[in-house]
Image (cartoon, helix red, strand yellow):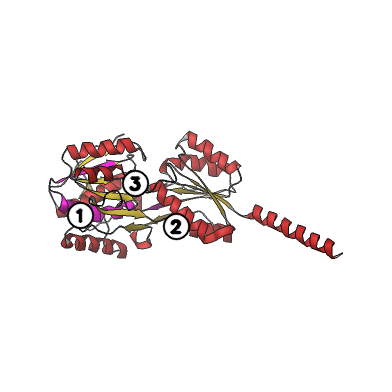
């Protein structure tokens, strides 16, 4: 009798474990580039995933899908992920926006989170970092560290997120150096190591002695280190690849957001939201300043960071005119989030063009 009771208890415990395992939410992270990149956009998202997995332990199951194409091909991958029983999907690239919308409509019980997008549904949230805030300190430093008055900017796609970063950096640089010029190279890619390296070499050959990038690899930093110019890290601290070249870096911090959204899923309180965090929420951090930067310039850049964090400084405060000379913001007027999210023009003083 005792043996039968033991078997019954064992079977019940085993059954309970199976049921509980089935009830553990499955959460997918979809990446545009390799998950094992040592730095950059996808690296930071995957670091956030790892932080969330460690925080929740066996309460959740996470998985990642790397090198997923944007556009229609990406939609098919997202559909397969949903069909495999995932409860929540974090789609971590701008080009996943339309596929994510389609997926959300097709699967009303699925929770979709899209990074850097601007369209939501009842079961799809959006989230992003205010990258343009980090460009202010970069512009202040670049404007005073350059000897050629020429900054090279390696840009990915001509979307508002990238355009406002260019404008923010340029306005900050112009505020301390009226002779500063930006040369912009568009790659139409987030992740293309050979193209990023070639762009960096081209810009330096054209006279740029400081590089800023809105692309995902360390190739521009490596080139800057090799050729003896300065650069800023993007998404991650890239000091390992440019110990002499890196002046600072903008660092994305996704972990706390992922933990909060997964907690909402577990609590049953998840709802569609739009999150756009920056320096004041620590979704954006600034890597330490290089010792190559004079203390006076470090203090000036740090002061700007502090004032942005406290709300005393807005990177887009008028008077600011558009590139074509028409008015945009009057003196003392600040841009609204709608202005920033839809920005499709350069500010006055930038000589490059935005591809159509």
Q: At 28% from the left edge and 38% from the top edge, which residue is drawn?
A: 197
Could you say which quadrant of the image residue 157 lies in? top left
* Front residue of this view, candidates 281 and 285: 285
Reading the chain from its start, which is encountered first: label 1 or label 3?
A: 1
Q: Secondary structure at mark 2?
A: helix
**Above or below for 280 versus 99:** below
Residue 187 visible to an observer of this rendering: no
Residue 160's x, y, as percent?
Answer: 33, 44
Q: Secondary structure at mark 3?
A: helix
Residue bearing mark 2: 255
Reading the chain from its start, which is encountered first: label 3 or label 2?
A: 3
- As drawn, the label of residue 141 is 1
Residue 67's x, y, as percent?
Answer: 45, 39
Whole-number angstrom distance, CA of label 3 to CA of label 2: 21 Å
Density class for disc 3 (Cα within 10 Å; few <14, some 14-19, many ≥20) is many
Density class for disc 2 (Cα within 10 Å; few <14, some 14-19, many ≥20) is many
- As drawn, the label of residue 161 is 3
Q: Quadrant of the C terminus?
A: top left
Residue 131 visible to an observer of this rendering: yes
Q: Secondary structure at mark 1?
A: helix
Contact between marks 2 and 1 (CB within 8 A): the answer is: no
Q: Which residues are magenta?
A: 128-154
Could you say which quadrant of the image residue 217 lies in? top left
Tell me if residue 161 is in the magenta stretch.
no
* Front residue of this view, candidates 171 and 2: 2
- The residue sitting at the right extreme is 1
Q: At 23% from the left edge and 43% from the top edge, which residue is drawn?
A: 226
**Above or below for 314 versus 340:** below
């Amino acid at each position: 009798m005792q043996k039968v009771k033991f078997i019954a208890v064992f079977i019940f415990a085993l059954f309970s474990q199976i049921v509980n395992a089935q009830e553990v939410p499955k959460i997918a992270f979809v990446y545009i580039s390799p998950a094992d990149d040592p730095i950059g956009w996808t690296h930071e998202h995957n670091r956030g995933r790892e932080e969330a997995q460690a925080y929740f332990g066996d309460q959740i199951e996470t998985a990642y899908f790397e090198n997923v194409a944007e556009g229609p091909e990406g939609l098919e991958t997202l559909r397969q992920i949903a069909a495999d029983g995932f409860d929540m999907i974090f789609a971590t690239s701008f080009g996943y926006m339309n596929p994510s919308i389609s997926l959300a409509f097709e699967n009303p019980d699925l929770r979709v989170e899209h990074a850097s997008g601007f369209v939501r549904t009842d079961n799809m949230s959006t989230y992003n970092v205010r990258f343009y805030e980090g460009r202010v300190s970069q512009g202040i430093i670049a404007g005073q560290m350059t000897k050629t008055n020429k900054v090279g900017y390696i840009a990915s796609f001509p979307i508002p997120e990238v355009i406002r970063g260019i404008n923010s950096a340029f306005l900050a640089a112009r505020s301390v150096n009226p002779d500063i010029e930006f040369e912009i190279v568009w790659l139409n890619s987030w992740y293309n190591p050979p193209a990023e390296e070639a762009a960096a070499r081209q810009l330096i050959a054209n006279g740029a002695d400081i590089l800023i990038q809105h692309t995902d690899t360390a190739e521009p930093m490596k080139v800057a280190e090799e050729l003896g110019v300065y650069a800023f890290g993007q998404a991650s601290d890239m000091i390992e690849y440019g110990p002499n070249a890196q002046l600072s870096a903008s660092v994305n911090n996704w972990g706390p957001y992922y933990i909060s959204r997964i907690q909402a899923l577990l609590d049953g309180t998840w709802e569609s939201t739009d999150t756009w965090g920056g320096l004041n929420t620590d979704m954006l951090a600034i890597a330490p300043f290089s010792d190559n930067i004079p203390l006076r310039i470090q203090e000036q850049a740090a002061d700007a960071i502090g004032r942005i964090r406290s709300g005393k400084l807005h990177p887009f405060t008028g008077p600011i005119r558009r590139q074509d000379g028409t008015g945009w913001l009057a003196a003392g007027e600040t841009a609204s989030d709608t202005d920033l999210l839809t920005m499709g023009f350069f500010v006055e003083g930038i000589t490059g063009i935005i591809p159509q």
